[in-house]
Image (cartoon, rainbow, N blue to C red):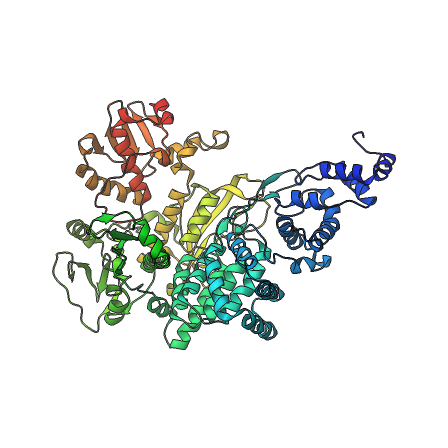
Amino acid sequence: MGTYDSELDLQLLAAQPVPVRQALFDEWTVPGQDSNQLYGRIRALLSGGGLTGSGWLDRLGGQAWLGFGRWSTLLVTFTRESLRTEYLAGRSHPAALATWRRTRIEFSFRDMGDEDAAMWPTVNVGEKWADRAIADIEAMSEERRSRWQALLSHCLLGADKARPTAAWQKSARALLDAVGVDEFTDRLDDWLPLVGLPRSLPLRMTTCCPGHIDDFPPRLADRHNVGVLWGLLWMRAMCPPSEETLRSLGHIAERAARKVPGHGPSSPKLANVAVAVLVDTEHPAALAQLARLASRLTYKSTLRIVEKGLTKHAEALGVGREDVEEMALPGFGLPLADKLGDCAYELEVRGIDAVVVWRNADGKVVKAPPAQVRKEHGEELKELKATVTDVGVTLIATRDRLEGLLRRDRTWTVEQWRERFLDHPLARTLARRLIWSVDGVACCWSGDALRTADDTVFEPTADATVRLWHPVDDPTSAPAWRDFLARHAITQPFKQAHREQYLLTDAERATGTYSNRFAAHIVRQQRLNALLSRRGWSYVQHRDNGASYDAPWVALADWGLRAELNIAGISDASVDGVFDTMVTDQLWFARDGRTPVPLEEIPPVVLSEVMRDVDLFVAAAGVGNDPNWFDGGPQGRYRDYWSQNSFGDLTPTAQTRREVLAELIPRLAIGSRCTVTDRFLEVRGDLHTYRIHCGSGNILIAPEDRYLCIIPDSAKAKEPEMFLPFEGDSRLAEIISKALLLAADKKIKDPVILRQL
């Protein structure tokens, strides 16, 4: 056949015997193949009838869906009929069945019937929880298996609704009774921890157009399975709750709301149903999960359900929503210590990490319990591991919430403060490392008492008001508190005594209602979006399509304000039209929607905290701090900007880092080889002298100021075990690591670095 098949060619093709047409069909129907000739040829092959789809289904099983070229649309009916024929003949094609189900959802082939919903397996293979469920059910007796299959099929019947109807719940109750509530909860509680983990079966999918194939994201949820989970979770809500289930629901919501690059959240629907079930569950652990999610989620739709749930519980208790979040914080039984066999363990909180310390029968610290203990106490170890994970994520969420309170107008009575923070089993690991203002007196816990900056023991009165201390409120005392932290070796969970202070400048008084302090910075939009979400700002990625987009903004409800940062796309739009780089512009505040507010009227704490956020955005998302952009990016257009920001004047954050380095470096073994200058940490190696910028962490080789590119992952020197005054500054640790590496430059073995030296 030629480049273009004539009608006679196609007629001859259709007239070929079945074996010939079958062989050609199997050769040409390759998922992902792109050819203008295929449509007519496959239509001709199918027109003669008699073809079997077994081989086609085997080839289809590795695809995300049936939609990789015009010719593939011919196979919609053929695929459906082949699946049905093979299934009735007792031949299983679970991967192809999964592909077909995803196709029906993705391309809205709703009119093709629901026969595939009745085929086993009811859930799509390829996700770890689904694989476990299939294996468990297939191992059952025929009678039990049929009951479970009926239950799973029912799960899909209401999946297009936000909440189950009364009729659905009535049928679900009968199916639960048939399976057995205890068996159902035991099985489901075993499957739920696996929901949201990376796929077990890799898939391929068409991207922008036929012939352009890519890997299906391993953490992107299977939409058919989400429908089954919708029903399973609501059925679980009809059974007695357990802490294990509620913990799993919290993890599912977090995983499902997490963004998959290029696709958005993994599954907003799954995140929403997991949270909705938590809201409907009357159990302290459900409330604790909602409180944790309030600080962890960034996807607005799901976060709104969390906030409504917390408000609902607050109204029921007659307290404020924030009070509910604080009251719901679990203590996890801390301090947690026990024995398993002849091994003792203790859960320790180190900074914002939870670790288990094991000791053998002789009291010696060991890395892990012996095999005998793991064999005899498997369930206890599993539960301990889950608790450690929960403590860790709760610590991070609590740390983030506490830091967010620095821009809030939040106060407590002394009784509330002690119960929720200072004496709380978990919160105190953070709260006792922070500085608090009690009726205007700043104090911090040290030893066994609250103390002022001069170490005087302080005892609050019962009627005092407590709030978090901020250095903007008392700038002159910040140095004394830094000395206090060093004297007592207290590492704060976030910068507080060392926190940067952003005070109003004369230029900002002149502009009146806006600040240009952070204008004209070039930032990577994807990185910016992640930072905005993490800090509680709202933003929709800008595309190169001429549409109007809102600027990034953050609500400051306590003050009746809203802050906005103007940005614009400048170039380098990706394939889907999303700008890669953006340029920043004015920062301004508004009241009543869009009414600009003079900067002099903004409370100093609010101004400082918002500006600190924006400084973080332009520093962490800016191309000037990215060593991969030392060549200036596409066509070198940002080379001057990159050089200026990589080695220029220090921002307030970088100035704080420089001050800390000046205190820390002399304590290291390499201290005699180092000098802190106005912008750099200079390190004298055996081969060269190196200048590490205190802001970007980028390096110049003196005296010619030749750029040395060291990606952080290639700086292999071990970070020293030393006191740091605060956690959370990864750039500080990176600079110290690079200094250790370069001070011993003769020992460097990395070939990429050696070529530059």
Q: Is residue 123 left or right of residue 563?
A: right
Residue 223 in the image: state x and y as whole percent: 58, 55
**Residue 40 pos. (x, y %):** 79, 39
Instruction: Identify the residue at the far front of this view.
Output: 141
* Picture mark count: 0
Q: Nearer the viewer, residue 553 or 324?
A: 324
* Residue 87 visible in the displayed image: yes
Of residues 210 and 23, the one nearer the viewer is 23
Vertical order, 714 against 265 (above or below): above
* 148 vs 625, nearest the viewer: 148
- List x then y, in percent, for residue 53: 72, 46
Task: Determine the image quadrant of residue 70.
Answer: top right
> Foreground residue, 404 or 752?
752
Q: Position of residue 500 (x, y in %)?
A: 29, 49
Split into 4 quadrants, where in the image is the C terminus? top left
- Tell me what residue is drawn at x 80 percent, y 45 percent: 50
Q: Is residue 560 visible?
A: no
Above or below for 324 versus 687? below
Q: Relative to 100, does residue 708 appear above or below in the rendering?
A: above
183 horizontally vs 12: left or right = left
Please indicate whether residue 527 sits to the left or right of residue 123 in the image: left
Q: Quadrant of the rendered structure where residue 518 is?
A: top left
Q: Quadrant of residue 290?
A: bottom left
- Left or right relative to 163: residue 243: left
Give the quadrant of the N terminus: top right
